[in-house]
Image (tube, grey):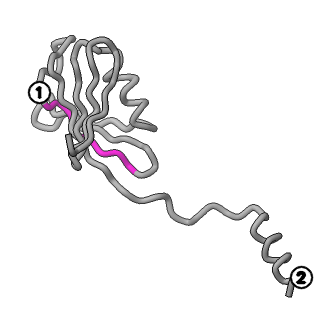
């Protein structure tokens, strides 16, 4: 019996092929700018987006109407690096569908507020 357990443990250590499916789950959010430093997209809710379980982020600009533009980023942080962090004066607020918020302040800091706050 002990030999059988040893074989099972050895099998567990062997490399395995990747799973057939990617992780699943989508989290939607909006992007609200309290100020528009560049004067291009305006103030208020300017983007709707989704964060996939893989971390990839898809955004839909609500300006210019009627369709705006769509962009895909490898991660939410990549989106932040391009459209949020370079413009701290905008005081951007990301709000997820569960109510959690990421608030970017003019001094470059970010604060997370839970849905309960």
Residue at screen point 58% across, 64% down? 19
How many discs appear?
A: 2
Residue 9 placed where, x, y %? 79, 71
Q: 26 above or below 72?
A: below
Q: Are marks 1 and 2 in contact (CB under 8 Å)?
A: no
Quadrant of the rendered image containing residue 59: top left
Label 1: how many residues lie within 10 Å, few (<14), some (14-19) or many (20+)? some
Residue 94 placed where, x, y %? 25, 34
Q: Secondary structure at mark 2?
A: helix
Earlier sequence position, callout 1 versus callout 2:
2
Residue to which mark 2 is pinned: 3
Quadrant of the rendered image containing residue 5: bottom right
Q: 115 above or below 45?
A: below
> Mark 1 to mark 2: distance in Å?
66 Å
Q: Nearer the viewer, mark 1 or mark 2?
A: 2
Per the rendering, the mark at residue 44 is 1
Q: Which residue sits furthest bottom?
A: 1
Per the rendering, the mark at residue 87 is none
Residue 17 placed where, x, y %? 68, 63
Label 2: how many residues lie within 10 Å, few (<14), some (14-19) or many (20+)? few
Quadrant of the rendered image containing residue 31: top left
- Any magenta on residue 49? yes
Residue 3 placed where, x, y %? 89, 82
**In the image: residue 30, left or right of residue 74:** left
Specify start and end residues of the magenta stretch as a single range. Answer: 45-52
- Any magenta on residue 56? no
**In the image: residue 75, left or right of residue 20:** left
Q: Secondary structure at mark 1?
A: strand
Residue at screen point 40% across, 23% down? 81
Q: 100 above or below 37?
A: below
Residue at screen point 84% across, 83% down? 4
Q: Nearer the viewer, residue 53 or 6?
A: 6
């Amino acid at each position: 019996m002990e030999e059988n357990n040893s074989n099972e443990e050895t099998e567990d250590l062997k490399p395995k092929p990747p799973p057939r499916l990617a992780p699943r789950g989508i989290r939607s959010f909006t992007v609200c700018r309290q100020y528009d430093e560049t004067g291009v997209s305006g103030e208020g809710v300017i983007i709707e987006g989704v964060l996939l379980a893989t971390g990839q982020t898809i955004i839909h600009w609500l300006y210019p109407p009627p369709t705006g533009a769509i962009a895909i980023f490898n991660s939410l942080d990549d989106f932040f690096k391009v459209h949020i962090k370079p413009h701290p004066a905008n005081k951007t607020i990301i709000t997820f569908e569960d109510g959690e918020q990421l608030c970017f302040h003019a001094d470059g800091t970010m604060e997370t507020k839970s849905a309960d706050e």
